[in-house]
Image (cartoon, grey):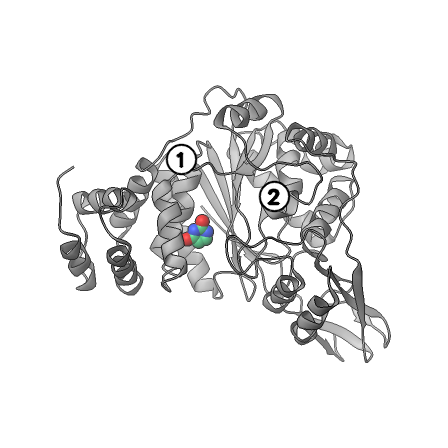
């Protein structure tokens, strides 16, 4: 690969120019190898944030990130493969019931997931509250479980899109996370490298999401669908509501417990609805439009796959989940209707309770979290429980009170409740 001067690549983008394929290939590769320095890549990321990228540049950037590592080969898996990616939200535990559900309907679901940072939780943190469960699998274990069980949720290996691993950490500390070309290429490079045949994207919109505006979420969704399609991954995106937490549980063990309720045929209506909508999209994407996910929840087939999947990774699906010693129930101070439960503030409260981390290396509490007793639209009377705060230490409850209280509003008239699925793109 011919060499360039990093400063010329930075200047091109700084001045609003279009990077050539060769410049993109070089800069991504040279940065991964440590030849382009962090400060140079920071400047380039900021130039991309401010100037944007053309569709051609985004496609090439994504291809270069994929080429920085290995691309998994899932051709040995006889069932069609399909994955789901959510851009992240508060109480978003959908991966947990969805993965075994779609596997129970005949597809194979390779789910490489991450840990939480800030106010949104991470799937691996949630599953680690199950005694014995382990997130790290070798590539061989991953493909064997996919073949035998049809469902795997585990950590992405170091060799998958290493350029993204390095660049994402840099963006996190340089104010450049929010660039749509960089978010789209970051997510899609990992999903394409994972080897899935089809992909359903759940792009969240609202206070608890990355994308606060529908316009930005739409652009991100369109960009990702184009990238997937260009790499022969059948890709569709749903735009879904994230101004209110999903379900009633926000935390780690509490979200696992709620997911198990869904797999047992119960659970909150919004979690069940989104799980089924995404399951149907995934099954259509792999040519199984007649599969009936609702029935697979009802008749216990999805639960059977969940139990096998958890056991395959060392977990005990029957073990009691960690419980918090400190629990504070907060009650309504007047009659009316719950008009809002702000997802961002509840996410921050759960984080203050210990469910999330401030830095990548911080531990999380399995037992901490928020449990909502009322959701927007529900009527309340004075003294009814609104939500509870759970933590391992009383100081954590004190630290979370103000954010949780500010999240919940009560009105005299019933509010208009927004639909969960806003749009479909692809
Ligand atoms: N998630 C990712 O994997 N990458 C981003 O850039 C943002 C969210």
Query: Of residues 7 and 417, which is closer to you in this image?
Result: 7
Q: Residues within 10 Å of mark 1 (few under 14, many from 20)?
A: some
Query: Of residues 109 and 45, which is closer to you in this image?
Result: 45
x and y percentages locating residue 153 in the rendered image: 58, 37
x and y percentages locating residue 141 in the rendered image: 54, 25
x and y percentages locating residue 176 in the rendered image: 36, 61
Which residue is depicted at the point 35% across and 51% down? 167
User: Count of labels shown?
Assistant: 2
Dot placed on the residue nearer the N-terminal end, 1 or 2: 2
Which residue is depicted at the point 56% across and 29% down? 108
Examine the rendered structure and indicate whether residue 192 appears above or below residue 4.
Answer: above
In-image side of 332 versus 25 (left or right): right
Which residue is depicted at the point 78% across and 46% down? 266
Which residue is depicted at the point 81% across and 75% down? 332
For disc 1, the marked residue is 159
For disc 2, the marked residue is 95
Examine the rendered structure and indicate whether residue 151 appears above or below residue 189.
Answer: above
Quarter of the rendering occupied by the C terminus: top left
Query: Of residues 410 and 361, which is closer to you in this image?
Result: 361
Q: Report helix, strand or loop for mark 2.
A: helix
In-image side of 54 versus 399 (left or right): left
Query: Of residues 134 and 106, which is closer to you in this image?
Result: 134
């Amino acid at each position: 690969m011919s060499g360039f001067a990093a400063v010329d690549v930075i200047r091109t983008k700084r001045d609003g120019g279009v990077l050539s394929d060769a410049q993109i290939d070089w800069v991504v590769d040279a940065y991964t190898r440590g030849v382009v320095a962090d400060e140079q890549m920071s400047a380039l990321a900021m130039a991309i944030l401010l100037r944007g990228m053309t569709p051609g540049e985004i496609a090439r950037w994504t291809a270069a990130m994929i080429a920085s590592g290995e691309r998994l080969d899932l051709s040995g898996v006889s069932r069609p493969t399909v994955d789901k990616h959510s851009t992240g939200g508060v109480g978003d535990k959908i991966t947990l019931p969805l993965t075994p559900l779609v596997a129970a309907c005949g597809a194979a679901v390779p789910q490489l997931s991450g840990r939480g940072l800030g106010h949104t939780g991470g799937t691996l943190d949630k599953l680690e509250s199950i005694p014995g469960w382990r997130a790290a699998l070798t590539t061989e274990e991953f493909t064997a479980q996919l073949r035998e069980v049809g469902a795997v949720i585990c950590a992405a290996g170091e060799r998958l899109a290493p350029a993204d691993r390095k660049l994402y950490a840099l963006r996190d500390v340089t104010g450049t996370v929010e660039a749509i070309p960089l978010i789209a290429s970051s997510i899609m490079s990992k999903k394409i490298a994972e080897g899935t045949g089809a992909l359903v994207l759940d792009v969240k919109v609202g206070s608890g999401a990355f994308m606060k505006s529908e316009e930005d979420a739409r652009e991100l969704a369109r960009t990702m669908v184009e990238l997937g399609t260009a790499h022969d991954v059948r890709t569709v995106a749903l735009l879904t509501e994230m101004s209110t937490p999903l379900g009633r549980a926000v935390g780690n063990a509490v979200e696992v417990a709620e997911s198990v309720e869904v797999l047992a045929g119960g659970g909150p209506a919004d979690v069940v609805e989104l799980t089924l909508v995404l399951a149907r999209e995934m099954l259509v994407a792999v040519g199984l439009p007649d599969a009936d996910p609702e029935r697979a929840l009802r008749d216990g087939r999805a639960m059977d796959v969940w139990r096998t999947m958890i056991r395959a990774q060392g977990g005990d699906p029957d073990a009691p989940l960690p419980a918090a010693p400190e629990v504070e129930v907060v009650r309504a101070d007047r009659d009316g209707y719950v008009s809002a439960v702000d997802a961002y503030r509840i996410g921050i409260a759960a984080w203050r309770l210990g469910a999330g981390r401030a830095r990548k290396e911080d531990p999380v509490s399995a037992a901490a979290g928020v449990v909502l007793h009322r959701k927007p639209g529900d009527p309340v009377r004075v003294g009814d429980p609104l939500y509870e705060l759970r933590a391992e230490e009383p100081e954590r409850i004190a630290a979370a009170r103000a954010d949780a209280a500010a999240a919940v509003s009560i009105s005299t008239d019933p509010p208009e409740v927004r639909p969960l699925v806003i749009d479909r793109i692809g």
